[in-house]
């Protein structure tokens, strides 16, 4: 479903999910220089919550061209990719709330959100860690002669770690079917990426140095992302070997949900908000006479996510014995 | 053998078996791998120099042919020098349904892949709530290898025993190299398979089809005065020491742990409880070594007196006079055992 309205639906589902998760993360958390108010309600989402608010067009535009059999790895900022790949928002929200019906039974939380049943092999708490895994998954698909491909989302900060070079080189020498997507939000945690990164258009330039064709796109224009991804994904399915999509976007929020990101120039933030991908898509739909459909999509998304939050709030936490399950010999029991 | 022996000796020390082959430690592993690859098309191996039979010849059959000649370059995969991605791609291959054997050349180089092994492979099954599993065998050759100095001589079994989600194996004989590699391949979860670089050429009997269980020790000598626990190449010095002790009238149980995690607690506790003395001997550094875990467990659960013997906390030096300081020979084991018996 690659028409603008479908893309918009995915984007507003992600936006609603992120907004709800953000609200649920406020409260009794002490992190990032923030101290909890004495009367604050304990947060329902605890721990680091990395929001993709503002980056929805990249997830929606790329994943619109994928099937459940295609495999995906993501970053610590992975809710949008997971939703766009087809995961259920209620089971995702349960996971963020640490509840038993969550995809990971409450064992992973936001940073490890995943739905293997739709080929989403996991967000990752370690920057760049998804690239070698995606390349290995693509290698397996090639060895077995499957038609599926692997896609790997990573941030602009990831291109300065060694596994970026290793994984791209590996993908190219074995010509495995993988699409690398650099979701360039221009900031590495709380540090601007540009002064930390040698060269210009570094994600693309480094890929091209290894013979991997790179496409640059306005990552806040969902149609542009979708059109670029359509071409790249079709090419990879037809045997082009690896490709890289470099999508320029902007992170609306701080590094984590309770980070007010005061290190950014307010003028820069204000300017960036004018390019909000959700607003741009909505205005384009309105210009096409689809304002009512867009409003419906938004209302549906908000209702869906409100129901997910209500379900997650009421869901049970995992039993303590779960701490010893889903793992090879822990030593529990026989070793006590 | 007394009736108290928990685990009968493995086939390597049993009465001669006419169906046994005589193989080197390296060839025994190659036989296990080739049998597994023959039986299951999802088993692949990846690492540096595998196309030439592996840097130690451990990807070369007893007929001298490199496994790549039999299975092709798509299943015996020559890789770039990219340890992070060798291990990380192994995780991805496993998640996508393959059963990778990941070769790290020497354990020292696996430190370049520590995130992929510890944070990715080991955690995956638990962290994602059992949605996937990582049936990956990481081969990390360990141990002092003459004149190879500080970055090619280390034994890190205690590091990996500390990591939930990893199984750690260290075979001492060709029979166990064969039998435990089969078990590692069948386990369905990540296994760190630590082969000793100075055992590759060791010859011994290997009976095709005889696999060894993970987590079960092997008893090599039986005695009621002291329990000697060891693994990997150090087992051979300990056995030599036990024979020297026997000549002095001291009876030693000698236990080859074989699996570092899970370790055969029942066998060790039974023996130490009976002899009243436990000496753990390992080539790796004594401080924070796995011997400390064994000694503490025995002290917690039996009345036995415990002692450890491992390497001093020094990098392995190049010159023979320096390297020998990091090695533990039979004479030192005898001395440590006699000292413990006098305590």
Image (spheres, coloured by chain):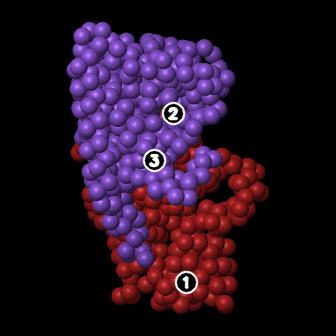
Q: Residue at x 62, y 28 (%)?
A: A264
The residue located at (55%, 83%) in the rendering is B299
| Callout 3 secondary element | helix
Circle on res. A25? 3
For this rendering, which residue is in front, A10 or A76? A10
- Whole-number angstrom distance, CA of label 1 to CA of label 3: 46 Å
Q: Are marks 2 and 3 on the same chain?
A: yes
Numbered disc 3: what chain? A
Sequence order check: which comes first, mark 2 or mark 3? 3
Q: Secondary structure at mark 2?
A: loop
Chain A: drawing colour: purple
Q: Colour of chain B?
A: red
- Is B154 left, or right, of A211 in this rendering? right
Q: Which residue is mark 2?
A: A253
Task: Classify B313 as above or below A245.
Answer: below
Where, quadrant-wise, is the N terminus of chain A in this rendering?
top left
**What's the mark number on residue B299?**
1
Q: Is residue B57 left or right of residue A90?
A: right
Q: Residue at coordinates 44% horizontally, 41% vertically from top-left? A: A22
The local crowd at label 2, few if under 14, some if 14 to 19, many if 20 or more residues have their Cα within 10 Å, is some
x%, y% of residue B274? 47, 90
Q: Chain of mark 1?
A: B
- A71 versus B162 height, above or below: above
Q: Splitting the image into 4 quarters, where does residue A263 fall?
A: top right
> Could one spot residue B82 in this view of the protein?
no
Residue drawn at (29%, 49%) of the image: A310
Q: CA distance from mark 2 to mark 3?
A: 13 Å
Whether A18 is drawn above or below A269: the answer is: below
Q: Residue B228, how many percent across, how many down?
A: 54, 77
Looking at the image, residue B161 lies above or below residue A77: below
Q: How many marks?
A: 3
Mark 1 or mark 3, which is nearer to you? 3
């Amino acid at each position: 479903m690659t028409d603008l309205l479908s893309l918009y639906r995915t984007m507003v589902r992600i936006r609603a999910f992120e907004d709800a998760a953000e609200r649920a993360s406020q409260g009794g958390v002490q992190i990032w220089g923030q101290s909890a108010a004495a009367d604050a309600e304990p947060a329902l989402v605890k721990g680091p919550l990395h929001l993709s608010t503002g980056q929805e067009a990249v997830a929606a535009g790329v994943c619109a061209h994928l099937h459940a059999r295609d495999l995906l790895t993501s970053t610590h900022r992975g809710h949008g990719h997971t939703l766009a790949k087809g995961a259920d928002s209620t089971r995702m929200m349960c996971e963020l709330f640490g509840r038993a019906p969550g995809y990971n039974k409450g064992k992973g939380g936001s940073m490890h959100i995943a739905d293997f049943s739709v080929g989403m092999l996991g967000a990752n708490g370690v920057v760049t860690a998804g690239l070698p895994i995606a390349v290995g998954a693509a290698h397996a698909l090639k060895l077995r002669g499957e038609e599926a491909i692997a896609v790997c989302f990573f941030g602009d900060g990831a291109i300065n770690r060694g596994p970026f070079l290793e994984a791209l080189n590996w993908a190219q020498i074995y010509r495995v079917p993988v699409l690398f997507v650099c979701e360039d939000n221009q900031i590495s945690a709380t540090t601007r990426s540009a002064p930390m990164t040698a060269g210009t258009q570094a994600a693309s330039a480094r890929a091209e140095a290894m013979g991997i064709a790179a496409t640059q796109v306005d990552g806040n224009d969902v149609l542009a992302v979708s059109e670029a991804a359509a071409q790249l994904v079709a090419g990879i399915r037809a045997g082009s070997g690896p490709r890289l999509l470099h999508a320029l976007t902007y992170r609306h929020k701080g590094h984590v949900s309770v980070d007010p990101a005061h290190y950014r120039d307010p003028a820069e933030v204000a300017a960036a908000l004018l390019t909000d991908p959700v607003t741009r898509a909505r205005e384009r739909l309105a210009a096409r006479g689809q304002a009512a459909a867009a409003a419906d999509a938004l209302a549906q998304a908000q209702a869906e996510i409100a129901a997910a939050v209500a379900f997650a709030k009421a869901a049970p936490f995992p039993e303590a014995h779960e701490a010893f399950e889903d793992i090879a010999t822990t030593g529990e029991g026989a070793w006590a | 053998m007394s009736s108290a022996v928990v685990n009968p000796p493995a086939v390597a020390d049993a009465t001669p078996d006419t169906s046994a082959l005589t193989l080197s430690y390296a060839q025994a592993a190659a036989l296990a791998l080739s049998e597994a690859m023959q039986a299951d098309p999802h088993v692949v191996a990846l690492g540096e120099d595998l196309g030439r039979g592996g840097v130690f010849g451990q990807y070369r059959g007893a007929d001298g042919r490199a496994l790549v000649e039999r299975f092709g370059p798509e299943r015996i995969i020559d890789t770039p020098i990219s340890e992070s991605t060798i291990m990380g791609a192994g995780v991805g291959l496993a998640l996508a349904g393959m059963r990778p054997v990941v070769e790290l050349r020497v354990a020292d180089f696996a430190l370049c892949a520590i995130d992929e092994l510890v944070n990715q492979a080991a955690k995956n099954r638990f962290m994602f709530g059992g949605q996937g599993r990582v049936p990956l065998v990481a081969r990390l050759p360990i141990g002092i290898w003459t004149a190879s100095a500080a970055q090619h001589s280390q034994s890190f079994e205690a590091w990996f025993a500390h990591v939930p989600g990893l199984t750690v194996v260290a075979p001492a004989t060709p029979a166990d190299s064969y039998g435990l590699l089969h078990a590692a391949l069948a386990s369905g979860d990540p296994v760190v398979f630590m082969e000793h670089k100075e055992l590759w050429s060791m010859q011994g009997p290997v009976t095709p089809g005889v696999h060894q269980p993970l987590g079960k020790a092997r008893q090599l000598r039986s005695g009621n005065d002291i329990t000697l626990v060891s693994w990997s190449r150090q087992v051979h010095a300990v056995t030599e020491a036990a024979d020297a002790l026997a000549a002095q009238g001291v009876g030693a149980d000698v236990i080859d742990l074989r699996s570092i995690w899970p370790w055969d607690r029942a066998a060790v506790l039974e023996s130490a409880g009976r002899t009243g003395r436990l000496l753990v001997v390992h080539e790796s550094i004594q401080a924070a070594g796995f011997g400390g875990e064994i000694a503490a467990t025995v002290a917690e659960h039996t009345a036995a007196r415990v002692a450890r013997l491992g390497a001093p906390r020094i990098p392995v030096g190049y010159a023979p006079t320096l390297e020998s300081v990091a090695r533990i020979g039979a004479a030192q084991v005898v001395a440590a055992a006699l000292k413990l018996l006098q305590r």
